[in-house]
Image (cartoon, grey):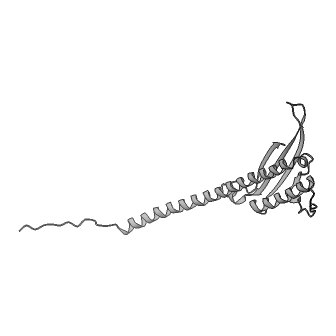
């Protein structure tokens, strides 16, 4: 009978190959974790920017609803200066425009600190400017919303600072 000669080949992986594979896999997983962290902070920053824009539009809507008080400058000032209006409107009679403006600013201040954190603040400024087209005067409202976004800013390499959204429109 013929003798068969069997050669033994490598069957399986060596320990070195397994360790190299684990090293490459762990480096890839660490990269994915860092990417997830950066994108999460970027999403948080974008969410706060969206909140700030929505809050700026909310006070602008209040000013348009109470236009006479806005034109008179009753909305001018910072949200931090807004105090809870203690004056109640008498039953059966309407509130004054300035009381409504005071209440709107207090409400806005509450929404800013709730939506943007304790550092959230806002400023409303109105100014009368000449309209070159009609020759009359227009009242321009500038709404500025500011908050601290230092966590996201440091992630992206920027210096820690407050972020500001400014909205300007003609009333």
Q: Where is residue 44 in the image (x, y as percent from the top left)?
A: 67, 58
Residue 24 seen anywhere in this rendered image of the structure: yes
For this rendering, which residue is in front, 78 or 159? 78
**Residue 156 is drawn in which quadrant?**
bottom right
* Residue at the image point whose x is 68% and y is 58% from the top: 152
- In the image, taking residue 14 as reference, residue 134 lies left or right, namely right
Vertical placement of residue 166 versus 131, above or below: below
In what quadrant of the picture does the N terminus appear?
bottom left
Q: How many labels does the image show?
A: 0
Q: Where is residue 63 in the image (x, y as percent from the top left)?
A: 84, 49
* Residue at the image point whose x is 46% and y is 64% from the top: 23
**Residue 85 is drawn in which quadrant?**
bottom right
- In the image, taking residue 144 as reference, residue 43 lies left or right, namely left
Outermost residue to the left:
1
Residue 119 seen anywhere in this rendered image of the structure: no
For this rendering, which residue is in front, 63 or 165? 63
Q: Where is residue 71 in the image (x, y as percent from the top left)?
A: 90, 45
In what quadrant of the picture does the C terminus appear?
top right
Q: Position of residue 122 (x, y in %)?
A: 82, 54
- In the image, taking residue 112 as reference, residue 68 lies left or right, namely right
């Amino acid at each position: 009978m013929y003798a068969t000669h069997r050669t033994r080949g490598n069957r399986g992986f060596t320990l070195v190959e397994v360790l190299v594979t684990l090293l490459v896999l762990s480096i890839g997983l660490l990269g994915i974790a860092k990417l997830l962290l950066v994108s999460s902070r970027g999403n948080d920053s974008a969410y706060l920017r969206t909140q700030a824009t929505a809050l700026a539009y909310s006070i602008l809507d209040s000013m348009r609803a109470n236009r006479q008080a806005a034109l008179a400058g009753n909305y001018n000032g910072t949200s931090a200066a807004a105090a809870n209006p203690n004056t109640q409107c008498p039953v059966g009679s309407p509130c004054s425009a300035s009381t409504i403006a005071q209440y709107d600013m207090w409400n806005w201040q509450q929404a800013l600190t709730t939506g943007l954190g304790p550092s959230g603040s806002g400023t409303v400024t109105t100014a009368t400017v000449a309209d070159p087209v009609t020759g009359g005067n227009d009242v321009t409202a500038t709404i500025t919303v500011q908050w601290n976004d230092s966590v996201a800013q440091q992630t992206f390499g920027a210096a820690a600072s407050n972020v500001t959204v400014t909205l300007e429109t003609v009333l």
